Amino acid sequence: MVRVALGFVALLSIAADFKAIDPNVFPKDDPRAKALPKMLGADLRKRMREANLNESEAFAKVTSRQLWEGHRQQRIRNLRDSLGEFPTVPAKMRIVVTRKLKGEGYLIHNLVYESRPGFWVSANLYLPANRSDKMPGFLISHAHHTPKGHGELQDMGMTWARAGCAVLVPDHLGHGERRQHDFATEKDYPRPFRPSRQDYYFRYNTNLQLSAVGESLMGWMAWDLMRGVEVLLKQEGIDKSRIILLGAVAGGGDPAGVTAALDNRIACVVPFNFSGWQPESNAPPDPDRNFDWFGDGYWESTRGLRGGAAGGFAHFIITGSIAPRKLIYAHEFKWDPKIDPAWPRLQKIYGFYNAKQNLGFAHGAGSVKNSGPGNTHCTHIGATHRKMIYPYLKEWFGMAIPEEYSKRRKPEELLCWTDEARKELKPKKLHEALQALVKERQAKTPPNAAALKEQWKRLLGPIDLPAKGKLHQGKVEDVPGGKLARFAIEAEAGIVVPFILMTPTKTQDKTPVVVMVAQAGKARFLQDRSEAIAAFLDKGIAVCLVDVRGTGETRGGSSAERGSSRTSISQTEMILGRTVLGNQLRDLRTVIRWLQTRPAFTGCRVAVWGDSFAPVNPPNVKVAVPLDAPDLPAIAEPGGAILAGLASLFEPSVSVVYTNGGFKSRTILDSPDIYVPHEAVVPGVIAAGGYVMGRGAFRSEGNVDSRNRLVDAKTDPRAAAAWVIEKLGGKQ
């Protein structure tokens, strides 16, 4: 007993020495050290500029209608593929009117329509009190500010209905009666938060759930709007040639533009703040290279579409693709055609059809940065903006300019769901609808490892290894049980991967090596896994601590919250057709391959240890909170565990995998509350069977669900190290 106790004390003494080691490859005063946290941002800006310039050059070569239509066809096909799998159009779509309201010269039908099996859209349909033949139809895509009952939306519905039109105003997925959270009023949470913004904020979680099964929020919004077109077309007396889609100023114009590109039944689209110029835009000196042609990497996914830059579907291409149908290029604030680089491109497209008369514009005044007089802020589409739209509708569709009408009803009157309707129709929440969808997708999961590998290549984006990268070697020092050397390798142009290699004093031919990776990086391994490192070195096993891009020494920010720089980086990678995890896997594989070029490690057995040092949420912590709550629950860090599993799939030398703190991806469909990083949700992960992988020996502990709560026992680093040693063939 005494011998064991003394041995344990000795091991703790060795471990303490590792904690004092400088984990950084570059000295703090080295310019390269200062550049590492900025590396990913610089790389993304460079690649986005290249994508902008490539698409600008490609569009400059489009000089005829024939060339344009070929250019458009491929890019709209790419757009369509990026959105997910649209279901089969139902032979008979169910529409249920739950209440009828009468007004002065108009009617309102509160209704729901089934856009997917068991998944319903709530909407208000404004109709003339006396219908006539050839009735125009309006479909309004509301802003992210408020759902369908807002006053501006009522004004438009009543005004155009009194003028003889049908007007459908549906709730977008996640908004109003389709919200996926429980924080509609200040009474719903005991601490300060913004109730009016929760529908908007929860778009982030909604998109993560959709992305996990290979879908997208934009795709589901567009599909709902397409089914809204059918609701209009089913109205008695509707004029099928006059279906007009309006997209409101903040987040409503995006799905309107995409929907019109995909649905030829729409005769005219007015997508505010979408196509190019934004309220925050300026005129860069080199717009071909520096303008936000593909949107930006913001957490709200509809502003920067997945695969946009990779697939060439710049926003102006999307709206320009409706030519020669009617387009009103619309802006909430002051707009100058002389400095907007998207405007001449749209004019060029319409010129191919000799249809520039079908291209109009509308705008307001002032700036988004100011709130005083003269600034035309609006919630959806204001009266100022509508005045510029009316003349086009008169010219194009023979619609008389209407008399504005506004006698707003209480939003409660416009609610569509009744107790009776819920009981009869049994509407599903999003996560419930996705659970059913997953059963279909998983039935298509490849049955063998080779096919699974190919599927993951598609999901992750480019992961092929580059040519041999430049290697930097830093200082070398003795450590307990071995020697420590510092390295950095260029995994691709501009991307440096720092790592530490600790070789045991007792070397052998084909020395086994444990490669350790985590979001927190090398420093946390030295601090919190010293005992495991000491055990490996003592048994003649080398240890390699790797900071793949965005982790440890290269981390630009620690937060993984919705508005963090990490989320922005992950979303931008998706615009560029890549994923953060795919890039990190490339870095990890690069280091593993380099290790095997070293004489002592040629042909060696490799173990990958993927870890997490993030705190988990205890079972009693309330995880259902507003997304701007001052006390948000902790966010998981499963990246290291995920990468370890992926490495075993792609690297034949990896025969042992240990993970701690992984993410049970299927649990993302259990509730709308999600506390995992944006980059942890690779699009289509659930359809691919989740992140559980590993050839040879595989041990997984400390896994969490999507709410960052433990679903497995906590890890014991000493027991884990003993297991890895055994599987690598070391002696106990």
Image (tube, rainbow, N blue to C red):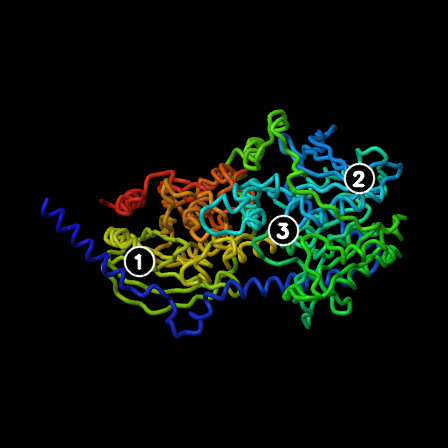
* Mark 3 or mark 2, earlier in chain: 2
Residue 104 visible in image: yes
Q: Which residue is mark 2?
A: 106
* Mark 2 or mark 1, earlier in chain: 2
Q: Few, some or many C-alpha atoms within 10 Å of disc 3 (few <14, some 14-19, many ≥20)?
A: many
In the displayed structure, 36 sits above or below 702; it is: below
Q: Is residue 696 left or right of residue 382?
A: left
Determine the secondary structure under disc 2.
strand
Q: Which residue is mark 1?
A: 526
Q: Of discs 3 and 1, which sits in the foreground?
A: 3
Mark 3 and mark 1: Cα distance apart in space: 47 Å
Kind of residue indicated by mark 3? His
When asked about the image quadrant of residue 158, the answer is top right
Determine the secondary structure under disc 1.
helix
| In the foreground, 699 or 162 | 162
Q: Which residue is mark 3?
A: 145
**Quarter of the image with the N terminus in it:** top left
| In the foreground, 13 or 360 | 360
